[in-house]
Amino acid sequence: MFLSTIDRQMDQKRRIVLPAEFRAAVGPLDGLFCFSSIEADCLEGGGPALLKVYDDLINELPFGDPLRSAIEINVRGGFARLTWDPAGRVTLPESLCEQFGLTDWVSVVGLGDRFQIWSKPAFAAHREQQRLVAREGLAEHRRQQRASRVAANA
């Protein structure tokens, strides 16, 4: 699993050192990949398990469906394989770095079966916004649970 948030400095060749735990999560033969995230303004990456999640999603949709096409273009068409050198560095694709303003410090965010790479300032803002969403969403979820228990006991 990809867990934690780690800030890394990207060098002039667009290389960053991924955490050893991330490299171990996929193994040297399976490899990593990344593409432009669908849900946020960042890179999304992972290993074969994440690719299978997207493949399963794509295959649920009929050929020619606009949603299927959009996901295929973004994930399969935007796919970039990441390989690491002996020092654990990966080189990020230039076009994706430019798209998301990745120039110096980046935040590498583990999300279980995937990870995201953000510009550090963009992630700080996103994290705060997501904290509020989580707080409000969890409070609403708890209210619904209580209401369900009360209704079941009535």
Image (tube, rainbow, N blue to C red):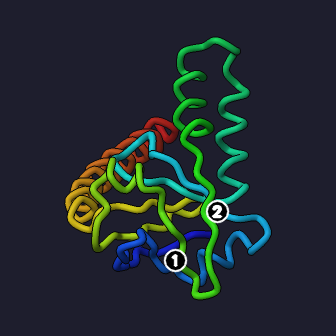
Residue drawn at point x = 33 percent, y = 70 percent? 106
Judged left or right of residue 62, residue 101 is left
Residue 74, position as x, y percentages in the image: 52, 35
- Residue 7 in sight here: no
Q: Which image quarter holds the N terminus?
A: bottom right
Task: Give the SS element for disc 1.
Answer: loop
- Against 144, residue 72 (above or below) is above
In this rendering, would 106 be left or right of 64? left
Q: Is residue 152 left or right of residue 49?
A: left
User: At numbered mark 2, what does the secondary structure look like: helix, strand or loop?
Assistant: strand
Residue 5 vs residue 140: left or right?
right
Residue type pointed to by label 1: Leu
Work out how far the residue at label 1 is from the one at label 2, CA to CA, in angstroms.
Answer: 11 Å
Q: Which residue is mark 1?
A: 18
Pointer 2 residue: 32
Kind of residue sitting beneath label 2: Leu
Residue visible at 41% across and 62% down in the picture: 117
Residue at the image position 52 percent from the left and 25 percent from the top: 70
Q: Is residue 40 above or below residue 103?
A: above
Q: Classify 10 Å Cα crowding around label 1: few (below 14), some (14-19), many (20 and above).
A: some
Residues at marks 1 and 2 touching, judged by CB atoms closer than 8 Å: yes
Q: Residue at x 51, y 62 (%)?
A: 115
Q: Tag 2 or tag 1, which sits nearer the N-term?
A: 1
